[in-house]
Image (cartoon, rainbow, N blue to C red):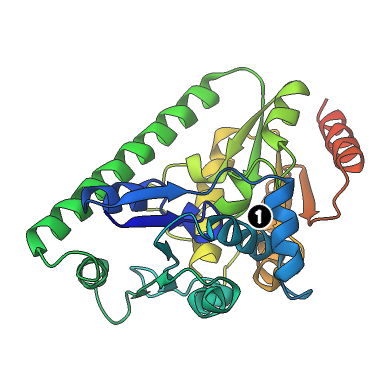
Amino acid sequence: MTTIGIPRSLIYWKKPQFWEVFFEEMGCKVVLSPKSNKEIVDMGVRVADPETCFSSKIFWGHLLWLEGKCDKIFVPRMKTDIKGLEYCPKFFGLPDIAKIIVKTPILSESFDQRKEPFEKTIQRLGRKIESDIYLIERAMNKGLVKEQELKKEREEKFARKMASKTKKILLVSHPYNLFDEYSNLQIEEKLRHLGAEPIFLDEVPLKGLTIGDKLGFEIPKFHWEFGEEMLEKIGLAIEYGLAGAIEISSFQCGCDAVIKEFVEKAFRTKKIPFLYLIIDEQTGEAGYQTRLEAFIDTLK
């Protein structure tokens, strides 16, 4: 039985739980790296280029943790989504850099939906493990079902949060920042202790909104998938009566440096208080906590 290692970081959060189900249904044993911790982050920081964003440094730590614990480590090359919009440029080179950092063989495939459907790429990936096309398609469908279940759970969670009477704070960022509790210093828990209800951007259900419909200003045409997705969901979330919004950005994220101006403008236009936080390996919890407390105080 082939053992597949999956780093629980960065690109993992674009399709959480899909890959575990897919490989397990293919007859593989899956080893998922643990939640981010100081040891993993320190390992990633030691091997990363100083100019690399904090999220990428964390990814390298997860990759190194898997070294020697599996037969192959899965690192896909994510290029474009179903709309033909590009992922972060750093995603493109992950498999190549991974082959330099670790000795464990890297299992990869390029997902470029401008050129071919996701399903066709999955079939090519699956044939690297199993020749039975029926088994590959069944594994893919099981993964997609799990993905839909997770989406439904998030939407139900969103509805419950919206029904509460506490102040709603929208957390805006990439999923690999929002769902990594170590890197964002447990912001969800901290906000709850301060009497606020944190709403993750990924919990906001999309309803076919045309970008810019409810933001109050014209949005440029983005070629990054997360730029369009962020502003679409913000356009929906602001209709729910938010008390405030917080954007979390990894230090050295060039894409966020551009998107941030439009994210902030969206909230300022609607007169929703906005806080911008940058995280890296040097971020101090005390200063982080103070900024959150000061922000919440302004909402009273």
The amino acid at mark 1 is Ala
Residue 274: give x, y in percent of width and height.
76, 46
Image point (54%, 25%), residue name: 161
Relative to residue 37, is residue 237 drawn left or right? left
- Residue 223: in sight, yes or no? no
Q: Residue at x 72, y 42 (%)?
A: 272
Label 1 environment density (alpha carbons within 10 Å; few <14, some 14–19, many ≥20): many
**Relative to 184, does residue 241 appear above or below in the rendering?**
above
Give x and y (percent) for residue 230.
Answer: 55, 56
Residue at 75% from the left image edge and 22% from the top image edge: 193
Q: SS of the residue at dot 1?
A: helix
- Residue 119: x and y in percent read 22, 66
Q: Nearer the viewer, residue 104 or 268?
A: 104
Q: Is residue 94 visible?
A: yes
Q: Which residue is mark 1?
A: 266
Residue name at image x 71 percent, y 70 percent: 47
Picture quadrant where residue 98 is located: bottom right
Relative depth, front residue between 283 and 86: 283
Tell me if 212 is positioned left or right of 82 in this view. Answer: right
**Res. 132 image quadrant:** bottom left
- Looking at the image, which is closer to me, 52 or 81? 52
